[in-house]
Image (spheres, helix red, strand yellow):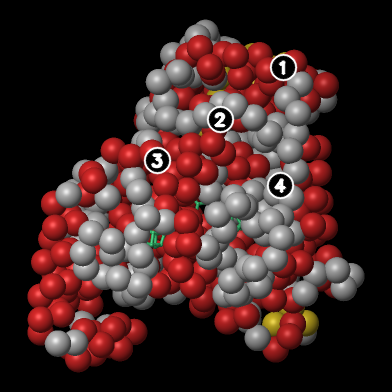
Amino acid sequence: MTDTVLILGDQLSFNLSSLAGRDPANTQIIMAEVGDEASYVPHHPKKIALIFAAMRHFAKALRELGYVVHYFEYGQAQDLLSACQQVAPLNTIHVTEPGEYRLRALFDQAGLQLHADTRFVCSHQAFRDWASGRKQLRMELFYRIMRKQTGLLMDNGEPIGGKWNFDADNRKAYKGEATSGPLRHTPNADTQAVIALVRSEFATHFGSLEDFWFAVTHEQAEASLAHFIEHHLPQFGDYQDAMRQDDDFLFHSALSQYINIGLLDPLSVCKQVEAANQAGKVPLNAAEGFIRQIIGWREFVRGIYWLNPKAYIAMNGLEAERSLPAFFWDERKTQMNCLRQAVRITREQATAHHILRLMVIGNFSLLAGLNPQAVSRWYLSVYADAFEWVEAPNVIGMVLHADGGYLGSKPYCASGQYINKQGDYCKHCRYSVKESTGEKACPFNALYWHFLQRHREQFAGNPRMALVYKAWDRMADTKQQALLAWGDHLLANIEQL
Ligand SMILES: Cc1cc2nc3c(=O)[nH]c(=O)nc-3n(C[C@H](O)[C@H](O)[C@H](O)COP(=O)(O)OP(=O)(O)OC[C@H]3O[C@@H](n4cnc5c(N)ncnc54)[C@H](O)[C@@H]3O)c2cc1C
Ligand code: SF4
């Protein structure tokens, strides 16, 4: 009796639940590069190239293990179910649950046999139990449970170093030399073929295919991890929130795209980071900060997404309706240097570190009242690590506060002062971060106050926002009026910023 397993493009893991306990000699596998998945949003060409190239390498590795792999190259099947139907009856096919509810609903309806995705620490049910009855969810409390459950950085039930979280030590601006960045891999002939295919089929999508350096095999991804641990992790903690004009990555790992498609196992990544700390190679604030991102934030946002994905992605709690300005697709159309750099990095790399996503592009989207669904579609399209389970809560919840504060206790809004404090973009900008109104003034400044006043009713009662509202109330009336009028002007002329 032959078992049939469908493996999706973000499920390239040997320890996949749908493969567990199966004999390769009696298992056939379906993998398909389908048009529907590659273009339901206009994915960045580097993201499509990464996924197709990694799929082809994984199929090869599975064949070497003895599996029969039915591989549909791009153009041979339009959608996943039609590929499956060419191999076996749908209700006999096993698949690990997909990361997007839209596909999950499709598979449920078609009768495929779904298996829980065991590559995560927290199951859907465990998260649901934890979240049940809570009006707001706080990552910090959830993270402590994950630490206890995994035993990472724990000693006899207590956090190593006596604290759960060293975030207060992680906000330094970086003044040293530019870093060497992530490990770059030279594409082999198979990957070159995929790049050529993507170049001809997805030419209209936003994003550059030049200089493709992503890992496409498990071995390469492990080498990227080892490179990060040796060269960048020791300073990851200190400079987690830093930004710099001449350095697109700083001390970030650039590993999320590998973790999210299965080339790296998240728990194994954390264990290697813990081991580096135990060996004295990496300080505790760096190891804890990094592990928190993975077993804390990554697990937390996934749990939130799956509580009610269909409703969550449609949320617009602040009733934000403005369309994306054209410069989200072409950085040359804005003079705001921080945004210009963040969009450039995104276009060139199909990735951007957290502070660029959160405090530059995200902060602007929040302050300018951009529509959450339009912003979400943009993030889902342009980042190689973007899959709805992780992208949507970060955008709808963390950045745009469109979920009514379910994910975050306060919006991450900031004026240009924050961006100036954390990096040197302002030094290279045509706007002056010190000014708040007038043609030279940094647009983030007036937009910040305009946002706070537009939403005073929602936020003024939040104790964590009390100080900023006090600062506003102490301002002279004329200054307040000038800020609001300038904010109106900026929003009316958003395409010219
Ligand atoms: C608006 C917005 C959208 C985002 N969209 C995505 C997305 O589509 N896919 C995605 O993987 N991450 C997303 N993130 C989270 C985070 O920005 C990226 O994981 C990170 O920038 C990837 O770069 P890195 O690997 O260098 O991360 P590092 O800074 O090195 O962090 C280490 C790892 O922690 C995990 N991580 C860190 N923060 C988060 C987070 N908030 N949520 C989930 N995982 C996290 C990632 O796996 C990452 O590789 C988003 C964040 C924001 C603010
Ligand atoms: S001055 Fe304002 S727009 Fe220019 S880089 Fe600084 S924060 Fe960005």
Which tag, 2 or 4, sits closer to the chain's start? 2
Q: Hey, which quadrant is residue 488 in on the image?
A: bottom left
Left or right of 318, for residue 434: right
Which tag, 4 or 1, sits closer to the chain's start? 4
- Residue at the image point whose x is 74% and y is 50% from the top: 180
Determine which of the numbered discs, if any, sits on residue 84 in the image: none
> Could you tell me how far apart the alpha carbons at marks 2 and 1 are, in whole angstroms?
15 Å
Tell us which disc is closer to us: 4 or 1: 4
- Residue at the image point whose x is 71% and y is 55% from the top: 179
Determine which of the numbered discs, if any, sits on residue 331 in the image: 3
Which tag, 2 or 1, sits closer to the chain's start? 2
- Does the Cβ of the disc 1 residue fall within 8 Å of ligand 1? no
Tell us which disc is closer to us: 2 or 1: 2
In the rendered image, the vertical position of residue 328 relative to residue 358, given as above or below: above
- Does the Cβ of the disc 4 residue fall within 8 Å of ligand 1? yes
Residue type at tag 3:
Glu
> Could you tell me how far apart the alpha carbons at marks 4 and 1 are, in whole angstroms?
22 Å
Determine which of the numbered discs, if any, sits on residue 182 in the image: 4
Near-viewer residue (121 or 231)? 231
Which tag, 3 or 1, sits closer to the chain's start? 1
- Structural crowding at the residue carrying mark 1, measured as other residues with C-alpha within 10 Å and reported as few (<14), some (14–19) or many (≥20): few
> Can you give x and y, in whole percent of width and height, for residue 201 in the image?
48, 14
Left or right of 30, for residue 230: right
- Does the Cβ of the disc 3 residue fall within 8 Å of ligand 2? no
Residue pointed to by mark 1: 190
- Structural crowding at the residue carrying mark 3, measured as other residues with C-alpha within 10 Å and reported as few (<14), some (14–19) or many (≥20): many
